Amino acid sequence: MSINVTRKGVLFEPDASRVIARFFYTSEARGMELITRVMSLTEKQQQENLNQVLRDFSKRHRSISRIFEKHFNRLAHLFKNLNIDVLSLSSAQKVLIGAYFTMEYSIESAAFFNPSIMEDPDQSETVPGQKRIILSFRATGEGHISSVVFRSGIIDSLNNITIEPVGKMLESPEHVKNHTYRKTSFLRKLEEMQSWNNAAYVVMINKLTETFTYEELKRYVDETRAVVPEDLQSQTLLNEIMWLASSHYEMNFSVDTAISERVIFPIADTEMKGIEDARFVRFTEDDGEVIYYATYTAYDGITILPKLLLTRDFYHFKIMPVHGEVAQNKGMALFPRKINGKYAMLCRTDGVNNYISFSENINIWRQATLLQTPKYPWEFVQMGNCGSPIETPDGWLVITHGVGPVREYVLGVSLLDLDNPEKEIGRLSKPLLVPNENEREGYVPNVVYSCGSMIHDGNLIIPYAMSDYASTFATVNLLELITELKKSKSS
């Protein structure tokens, strides 16, 4: 029996007009030449140039002069090399020089896809039957660099979805590296990445204290570089140490930003080529506290690193890497509460099958148990999850994706035992959602994909991407779906 799926017709498409101001830097030599050229202008020319820049860009960015000055502050080493005292420069000169080291980046010009949905922590000014929601998306721009962006809206009792107007003044967060590392766990993660046996490793082990900050670690690395041979293995190790350390950070957004204006753009070295497929979940602690977590994949162009994001208010975010043997692949999805006193996670350690893992520590995952293998033709190539499991009285509802002939991605649904989610108690024998003629053309043809769904008023709300280009919604009656899953149990 086919399940009735209602496509809602709400469309999220790439918008090239949404831009952020990024630091623009090519090389030390070119940077010094550029500063020299700007400084060669007369004071009048500098002011005229700055006035024109502010006229052109002040309406496109919030506090653009502050952004320019922030970028100027990253050039201290160039001024030192040029024997220029930065204290002698006027505020206008600093802002103008910063403008030359700034570029606009259109964050979603190429694709707007792989959404997840969650209940907004603020449910004020809603009426019975309504629920305020937050959606996250993977936005992709030039160079296929991905970031996380948000939209907000309201679902009513008839499952009509109204999306709030989208802000144009995009905001990057203030970046704060203030994590304290523990030597044992830091070295363990380093050894998980690869085996090290060189002079730099020995020196670093002796330098590291039981706990240390990012700034202290950077000093240890600089000191080690000065005393060890410049062999490739030693230098690679020291680069990997800083790469791993930059994975921990916190960021804050201004309280005067709309959520659609907040952009989580790659900051750490581990993320330089993108932040992929954030699976957000509203997690409830044993004491009732609610924390929003998201697992995502950081990509630096060579290596992927699973990471964990957490927030309580969507203004302040904390980022950390996920450790352990299980954390070696894409597609980790956290259960929305602990099970039998432990955190639980869906994962796909081999890229083909679905696994489940349990841990007492939310960012350390050591062992996984095989949960599901491809069973039906539409999932023979591989299968995976499409977001965190959803709790129902009948079991954990898991939206899955299956890959079949011609690499077509479809959505399926499984039901896991509530007390023992290692046990599958139902799985649809037919896909729930297959790309139709309007959905199968895009950046990656023949793909529907989601990173998280939710239940509202007896219906399953599924935001999903269409061929890695744009996104939309579908709804499914929960009772009809559960009834069919229970039938599959006995078949």
Image (cartoon, rainbow, N blue to C red):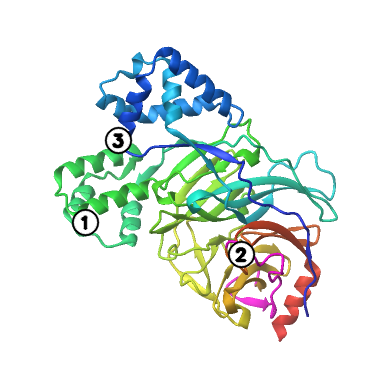
Location of residue 4 (image quadrant): bottom right
Q: Quadrant of the C terminus?
A: bottom right
Count of numbered tags: 3
Tell me the amino acid under the disc marked 2.
Cys
Relative height, residue 94 to residue 410 (above, below): above
Q: Residue at x 61, y 61 (%)?
A: 388
Give me the C-alpha separation between circle 1 and circle 2.
39 Å
Residue on which disc 2 sits: 386
Q: Is residue 331 visible?
A: yes
Q: Residue furthest bottom?
A: 491
The mark nearer the N terminus, 1 or 2, is 1
Q: Residues within 10 Å of mark 2 (few under 14, many from 20)?
A: many
Tell me the amino acid under the disc marked 3.
Glu
Q: Is residue 285 visible?
A: no
Residue on which disc 1 sits: 233
Q: Position of residue 39 (x, y in %)?
A: 35, 20
The mark nearer the N terminus, 3 or 2, is 3
Residue on which disc 3 sits: 28
Range shown magenta: 417-443
Tell me the amino acid under the disc marked 1.
Gln
Give me the C-alpha separation between circle 3 and circle 2.
44 Å
